[in-house]
Image: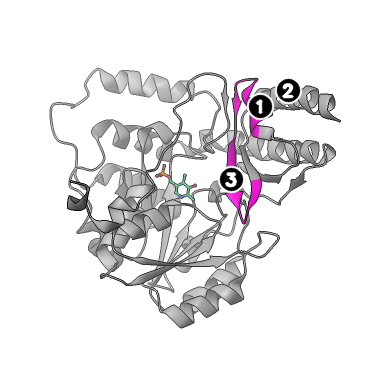
Amino acid sequence: MEQLFRKSVREMVPYHAPYIIEGIKLDANENTYPVLEALRAHMSEWAQTMPINYYPDTDSTKLREAIGKLYDVEADWVLCGVGSDQVIDCLMRSTLEVGECIVVPTPSFSMYKLSANVNHGEVIEVPLNEDFSYNVETLEEAILAHKPKLTFICNPNNPTGSKMALEAIKRLAKLEIGFLVIDEAYMEFTEESGIQLLKDYPQVIVLRTFSKAYGLAGSRVGYALAAPEVIQMIGKVKPPYNLNCFSEEIATWVANHHGHIMPLIKSIVESREDFKSYLESLGCTVYPSATNFLWVDSKWPLDDYLREASIYVKRFQYNGKRYYRISIGTKEQMEQVKRDLKSKVKGEM
Ligand SMILES: *Cc1c(COP(=O)(O)O)cnc(C)c1O
């Protein structure tokens, strides 16, 4: 029976993520601050008249208009997906012919490769520098050599936190080979968005999500920003009615009230720098981060230590070495992580 499945699917490693509802969850780069009181109040009121018996707006018009306002573009520059994961899949499905390739940095977000494989695409992986900074030269060489349909630049990068300067991105955009997809899932934690390139470089596509800084991972909403003719083509393969009415409502409210989120972002960035110094004081190597997480090289098994205290972080294996990606939670949570780590590490010193 296995033979009935596509070769690419048979060879696939299934995506898995633990579902954790207790303890301190710092393994998926979510915003762990409590849901805003004003948002809860709005959704309670909305629930009184929710139009759940009708199909939602297949074009998510209200949400696309709210997003457009954030960046001063019309709604026809925006395409919404069930997470930016779905937008990534739509990009692959609308561009790749069998055997065509994409260029991705490595290590980076695993979904690019996963999605390309399912969509009959080849994946050209271009390693970051040894210090996990971006290498624009090797990326440029790979693009020139392989002529990819899509090049993904995760900026800033998950899982390493590295950032590519806008000038370097512009250099890749100028090649005008395939689409340059800038995944800005964490751009709210830094600056120099590629959105300012959209008008001059129609082959640039920017991806954003409500899952990280905006604290709506559970509602699954992401989007692409690109020139209307690009959005229209990608939209052809978007499943109809992809966003449900609940997700559209909650993301629209947050887009219209994004000012409420800004203090949380500022606080997360402060905690990040504080926690970075703390880890360095324990002898860990911590890479510069422009995100809400840290990429850590440590001789201690940080994930095992913390799990005993019901604190969850993510372990990675890269080039035969262990690394840890630790999301930054609330101020109180990070104080607790510091306390727990200190007691564990002290015992080992
Ligand atoms: C989390 C993440 C996404 C996916 O976000 P969703 O909108 O929840 O699907 C996309 N890209 C990167 C780099 C991420 O880290």
Residue type at the position of mark 3: Phe
Q: Amino acid at mark 1?
A: Leu
Give the residue at mark 1: 306
Report the residue marked by disc 2: 340
Name the colour scheme: one colour
Give the mark, 1 or 3, whose residue is nearer the N terminus.
Answer: 1
Task: Determine the residue positioned at 60% across, 46% down.
Answer: 291
Sequence-earlier tag: 1 or 2? 1
Q: Is residue 72 in view from this perspective?
A: no
Say what amino acid the circle numbered 2 marks: Asp
What's the CA distance linking mark 1 and mark 2? Answer: 7 Å
| Residues drawn in magenta | 303-322
Q: Is residue 25 magenta?
A: no
Q: Secondary structure beneath disc 3?
A: strand
Q: Where does the C terminus fall, quadrant-wise?
A: top right
Residue located beneath label 3 in the image: 316
Q: Secondary structure at mark 2?
A: helix
